[in-house]
Amino acid sequence: MENNGNDNGGFLWGLLGCCIPIVGLILFLVWKDQKPKTAKAAGIGALVSVVLAVVYYIVVFVIIGAAGIAGGAF
């Protein structure tokens, strides 16, 4: 478990993982042994992005469903 270079877990890696979740996941998997703090930041960013997307879709479908019921769609 050799620590190469600077491993400060920077906010920007988390932001990158949040904006592009697949990149965050790949960075997490590649860096989990070499740079654990930075890997954790990228992985958490990716996880936050996925959770926010799921919550967004649930809220949208609930609103659409409520509007459909109120509008007499059945």
Image (cartoon, grey):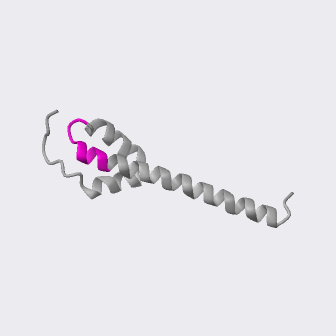
Q: Is residue 47 left or right of residue 32?
A: right
Q: Residue 33: x and y, percent?
A: 23, 35
- Main SS, magenta region, reads helix
Indicate the position of residue 23 as horizontal and vertical percent values: 37, 45
Q: Is 22 included in the stretch rendered in magenta?
A: no
| Quadrant in which the N terminus is drawn | top left
Asked if residue 2 is positioned above or below residue 18 in the image, the reply reads above
Residue at 37% of width from left, 42% of height from top? Answer: 25
Instruction: Look at 14% across and 35% down and name the residue there.
Output: 2
Question: Which residue appears at 86% of the width and 64% of the height?
Answer: 72
Q: Is residue 68 above or below residue 49?
A: below
Q: Which residues are magenta?
A: 33-41
Image quarter of the C terminus: bottom right
* Number of numbered labels in the structure image: 0
Query: x%, y% of residue 8?
Result: 19, 52
Q: Nearer the viewer, residue 19 or 10?
A: 10
Q: Is residue 27 left or right of residue 73?
A: left
Residue 27 place in picture, x, y as percent: 31, 42
Horizontal side of 47 relative to 42 (left or right) equals: right
